[in-house]
Amino acid sequence: MSVKDTKAEVNTITYDKDKIEDKVGSIYEAIVIMGKRAEQINAEIRTELHNKLDEFAVHNSTLEEVFETENKLRSLNITKSFQSQLQLLLKNG
């Protein structure tokens, strides 16, 4: 099978099986070690992702507070408007 015939991703890295086996002693042990390292990397990435998502969660709640404040200000302005109209009616009434 030619390298051109594979459907591997462009960023796929191939390793020399013999070099890996020489370092560990057995290709199966090397696969186990690579699997454990992959789990460690996955855990690190997951932790990093959760930390980033937590940052956005804080901003989302802050945005909700801003929208609440804007709504309260609109309500207050409407209330003031009605009060001023009522006072004019009472004066002219």
Image: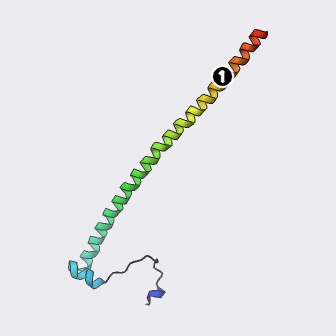
Residue closest to the far bottom: 1
Residue 3 percent across, percent down from the top left: 44, 87
Q: Amino acid at mark 1?
A: Thr
Residue under the image location 41 percent in, 55 percent down: 49
Splitting the image into 4 quarters, where does residue 80 fall?
top right
Residue under the image location 56 percent in, 32 percent down: 69
Asked if residue 37 is positioned above or below residue 21 in the image, the reply reads above
Splitting the image into 4 quarters, where does residue 32 fall?
bottom left
Residue under the image location 45 percent in, 43 percent down: 58
Answer with left or right where residue 71 lies relative to residue 36.
Answer: right
Splitting the image into 4 quarters, where does residue 73 fall?
top right
Asked if residue 75 is positioned above or below residue 10 in the image, the reply reads above
Circle 1: element type: helix
Residue 61 percent across, percent down from the top left: 49, 40
Which quarter of the image is occupied by the N terminus?
Answer: bottom left
Report the residue marked by disc 1. Answer: 79
Give the total of numbered labels. 1
Residue under the image location 26 percent in, 80 percent down: 20
